[in-house]
Image: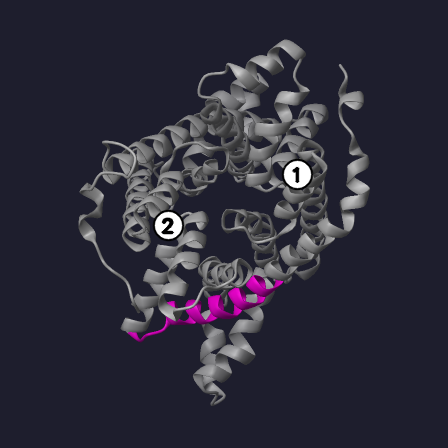
């Protein structure tokens, strides 16, 4: 094995500018976190709505929700990203299409956020549906029996329980969205994977670069995990396995 | 809306043989990574559950590490690091096969661990009472049941794996997506190619997940 280690590389300047390689990685980390959090917001809101709709008695609504899930689950993320970036602008009305292609600010960022948000919303929807269906039928009946309307039953009886039950799988999805945000490099978002590739080519210190970036991903994903664990502890329901006494 | 006048889907037909080559590599990568991943994953799961502490610790670390890094980073890692160790450059295709096998082993191992743990402990005692060795108990009693219990989840993971193979794009291996991209460039019609390839992925994944659903109903053990 013939490799020249150089751990000081991070503090050296990049070949074309005043920044150091560390600056590149830190700005990459910022974009990774920004893409992941913004997409998570979309995924959580839309996923909850779609997942809930999959369980309602209205068959038309349930079918629309199922179609959403099947569509976004059965196409690879990278292919979806390329579709959003190259194909969708062509389908818009002429003026809007031109604006998106030429003037839209931070186009890559918003494309990545929408794509990742919708992709993950299908997965969140499946978790929400599983959570609602794991509740005993009596809960819904009880809600309706005391005079709640169906939306009220969902709002005050079913969803508060379902969301608490699915926090562990939602934690996995949250960590997945951070990892999946790396795909955004393909359309030129300057996130961590993009910066890693750039730094590797610029510095030719691949191992140090990838070790540092792997560590950064690890730290972000682990923080997300701990954050969700905190929420999980604070929202425990007494009387369930793992619940508060 | 000038949807159909603006797009020219006639470029699909002449590029089909080329796309077929790409799909063949995608399928090959998926199948090798599935077989290798399930085999290594089962060994990892057995290691994690074994009473030999160092072995269990190494397996746990490997699985947790792989599961906490983006697949894309792992693909770049292997592509970069393996040639440094072996001293000679390696093709993107070979690198992709090694990477996916090693990466999927971690995910399959978690599924197999759950499968092994779903087998009642009495089954192990029964095997031991018959005088079977550890490997005999595992391969004749525990693992067949674990496989059967986990078959739908193993196949679902394989569908995810099939979708994830599109990420070899990053190192330039010629899979279905890369073939579509090249064909799109050659004909000056990338948009149509992306739409077509998305359709191909969708049809395959949708059909497979439908099959898995049916299989799930058929293989369920009545208790």
* Relative side of A121 to A60, left or right: left
Badge 1: residue crowd in 10 Å (few <14, some 14–19, many ≥20): few
Kindly tell me whether residue A55 is visible in this rendering.
no
Q: Nearer the viewer, residue A101 or A111?
A: A101
Q: Residue furthest bottom?
A: B131
Q: Residue A16, which numbered label?
A: none
Q: Residue furthest top?
A: A95
Residue for point 22% across, 44% down? A10
* Residue A38: image location, x then y, percent: 41, 26
Residue A53's quadrant in the figure? top right
Q: Nearer the viewer, residue B131 or A208?
A: A208
The label nearer to you, 2 versus 1, is: 1
Vertical placement of A186 versus A61: above or below?
below
* Chain to which the residue tagged by mark 1 belongs: B
Looking at the rendered structure, the number of numbered marks drawn on it comes to 2
Vertical placement of A179 versus B36: above or below?
above
* Relative side of A154 to B69, left or right: right
Magenta segment main secondary structure: helix
Badge 2: residue crowd in 10 Å (few <14, some 14–19, many ≥20): many
* Chain to which the residue tagged by mark 2 belongs: B
Report which residue position mark 2 lands on: B68
* Residue B4: image location, x then y, percent: 80, 23
Label 2 in the same subunit as label 1: yes
Q: Nearer the viewer, residue A112 or A2?
A: A2
Kindly tell me whether residue A140 is visible in this rendering.
yes
* Relative side of B125 to B222, left or right: left
Residue span colored magenta: B31-52
Q: Residue B185, which numbered label?
A: 1
């Amino acid at each position: 094995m013939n490799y020249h280690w150089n751990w000081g590389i991070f503090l050296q300047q990049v070949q074309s500018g005043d920044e150091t390689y560390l600056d590149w990685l830190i700005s990459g980390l910022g974009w990774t976190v920004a893409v992941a959090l913004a997409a998570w917001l979309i995924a959580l809101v839309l996923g909850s709505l779609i997942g809930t709709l999959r369980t309602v008695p209205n068959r038309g609504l349930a079918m629309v929700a199922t179609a959403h899930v099947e569509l976004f689950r059965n196409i690879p993320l990278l292919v979806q990203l390329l579709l959003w970036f190259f194909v969708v602008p062509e389908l818009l009305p002429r003026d809007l299409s031109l604006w998106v292609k030429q003037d839209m600010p931070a186009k890559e960022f918003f494309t990545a956020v929408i794509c990742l948000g919708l992709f993950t919303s299908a997965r969140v929807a499946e978790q929400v549906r599983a959570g609602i269906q794991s509740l005993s039928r009596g809960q819904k009946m009880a809600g309706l029996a005391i005079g709640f309307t169906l939306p009220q039953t969902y709002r005050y009886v079913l969803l508060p329980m379902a969301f608490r039950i699915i926090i562990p799988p939602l934690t996995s999805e949250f960590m997945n969205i951070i990892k999946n945000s790396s795909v955004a490099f393909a359309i030129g978002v300057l996130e961590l994977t993009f910066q890693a590739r750039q730094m590797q080519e610029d510095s030719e210190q691949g191992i140090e670069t990838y070790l540092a970036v792997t560590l950064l991903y690890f730290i972000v994903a682990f923080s997300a995990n701990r954050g969700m664990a905190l929420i999980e502890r604070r929202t425990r329901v007494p009387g369930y396995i793992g619940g508060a006494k | 809306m000038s949807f159909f006048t603006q797009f020219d889907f006639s470029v699909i037909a002449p590029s089909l043989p080329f796309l077929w080559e790409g799909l063949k590599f995608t399928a090959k990568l998926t199948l090798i990574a599935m077989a290798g991943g399930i085999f290594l994953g089962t060994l990892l799961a057995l290691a994690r559950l074994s009473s030999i502490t160092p072995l269990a610790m190494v397996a746990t670390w490997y699985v947790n590490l792989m599961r906490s890094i983006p697949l894309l980073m792992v693909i770049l890692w292997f592509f970069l690091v393996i040639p440094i160790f072996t001293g000679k450059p390696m093709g993107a295709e070979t690198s992709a096969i090694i990477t996916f096998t090693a990466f999927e082993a971690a995910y399959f191992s978690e599924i197999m661990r759950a499968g092994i743990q779903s087998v009642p402990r009495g089954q192990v005692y029964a095997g031991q009472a018959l005088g079977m060795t550890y490997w005999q108990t595992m391969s004749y009693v525990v693992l067949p049941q674990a496989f059967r219990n986990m078959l739908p989840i193993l196949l679902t993971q394989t569908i995810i794996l099939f979708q994830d193979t599109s990420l070899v794009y990053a190192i330039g291996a010629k899979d279905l997506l890369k073939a579509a991209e090249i064909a799109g460039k050659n004909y000056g019609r990338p948009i149509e190619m992306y739409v077509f390839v998305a359709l191909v992925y969708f049809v395959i994944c949708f059909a497979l997940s439908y099959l898995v659903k049916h299989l799930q109903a058929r293989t369920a053990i009545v208790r």
